[in-house]
Amino acid sequence: MAGPGGAAMSLALLPGDFWIASGHQLCDRDGARLVATPDLWRAFLARPELVPPAEACATERALHAALLADPLRMADPTGLADPDAVENWQVFLAFRDRVAAQPTLEAAWAALYRAGVAGIPPIFLQMLTQLVVRAALEGVTDAHILRAGETLFRPQRVAITQGAMLLADQEVVDARAADGDLGPLGRLLTEAGAAPREVELDVISGTNAHDYFTRSDAHDMALDIAEGRDGQAALARALELFIAHVIGEAVRIAATPVIEDRNWTWHVGLDAEASRTANALWAGKQVKQAELARILWLGVLEFDNPARVLPRAKGRPVYLALAMDQAQIMRMKPQNLLTGLPLPEPGP
């Protein structure tokens, strides 16, 4: 990783540390929250999307070098020869400035999603979300919870078989399938829609959970979130910690197999598919069985401080739903918790 003036920086794996590649070690701290530093922005600038290609003009290379030396400097890319490069740099600089305008990365994440993220490249949002989730899970030693936390910022390929509901990192599955890295779990993931190759992945369990910390950046361990499995409760714990850290609300979440509530008042879909299905059910509409079958996980959320809840939902549970799409890909949107929970809008 490049440091000031292009000097090399290294990130060390400390005992119990995880997601080193997120760059969390490059951040300062404001209590439990993260503060961006020039070195963190250098990590963004090291992304292949921003490193000038071989054919880049001298002006673009000079711009990149200047930003590596001073990542927060004012910059004007309009003089670059390539119009696409001009647009790319304008997008990055606008993102940088929006994040830098906030006191912490958590505040920046919330402000971005409340104001709208149209035009921001998904990779930047993924990097920012990973950092926020990493801070939320600081100090967690349960590998199942940490693996569940990955679902908040990395799409998952789903395989359902023989009582198991397996989540495996989509990017890893697709890459290994393309490479022909074979294994028994791969057959299940192939049937779930992966490329026609088998993929070798371990399902995290009590016997191999200790390996997670040295493998966390590989994202190569699958999680079973079927009813009664450790992953089902771990997902609830990860969401509790995220809500407490980012939104500042203490909540209790319990996984549930079904929602049977005639007074169903409030729900939050944790992805686009779950939102559509839950909205239809709440409105009393008929939902096709195939759509219901895509629901992977349901949760019941209760607030520790009911006084903070909007009057309509006070004293009532909030139901959470997570689903996969037709291609059996699950893409969680943790920002739905930010905007969808029955809480008053934050002040200016």
Image: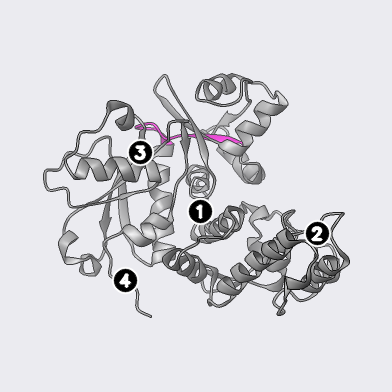
Q: Residue 17's image quarter?
A: bottom right
**Which badge, 2 or 1, comes first in the chain's sequence?**
2
- Which of the numbered marks, if any, corresponds to residue 52? 2
Estimate the spatial distance between the alpha carbons at disc 3 and disc 4, rounded to whole Å.
27 Å
Disc 1 crowd, CA 10 A, few/some/many (<14, 14-19, 20+): some
Disc 3 versus disc 4: nearer the observer: 4
Q: Earlier in the sequence, mark 3 or mark 4?
A: 3
**Residue 345 shows which numbered tag?**
4
- Residue 210, given in percent of the width and then of the height, sits at 59, 40
> Marks 1 and 4, how far apart in space?
30 Å
User: Is 227 a magenta residue?
Assistant: yes
Write the residue at 17% across / 55% down. 316
Residue 298 on image: x %, y %:
31, 41
Q: CA distance from mark 3 to mark 1?
A: 22 Å
For the record, the magenta segment spans: 220-230
Element assignment for label 1:
loop
Q: Are marks 3 and 4 in contact (CB under 8 Å)?
A: no
Label 3 Cα neighbours within 10 Å, binned few <14 / some 14-19 / many ≥20: many
Q: Earlier in the sequence, mark 1 or mark 4?
A: 1
The x and y percentages for residue 306 are: 21, 65
**Residue furthest to the left:** 262
The quarter in which the C terminus is drawn is bottom left
Vertical order, 129 against 5 (above or below): above
Alpha-carbon span between mark 2 and mark 4:
41 Å
Mark sitting on residue 140: 1
Q: Residue beneath label 3, please?
A: 297
Q: Is residue 203 above or below residue 85?
A: above
Labels 2 and 3: the sequence-earlier one: 2
Q: Amino acid at mark 3?
A: Trp
Amino acid at the residue labelled 4: Glu
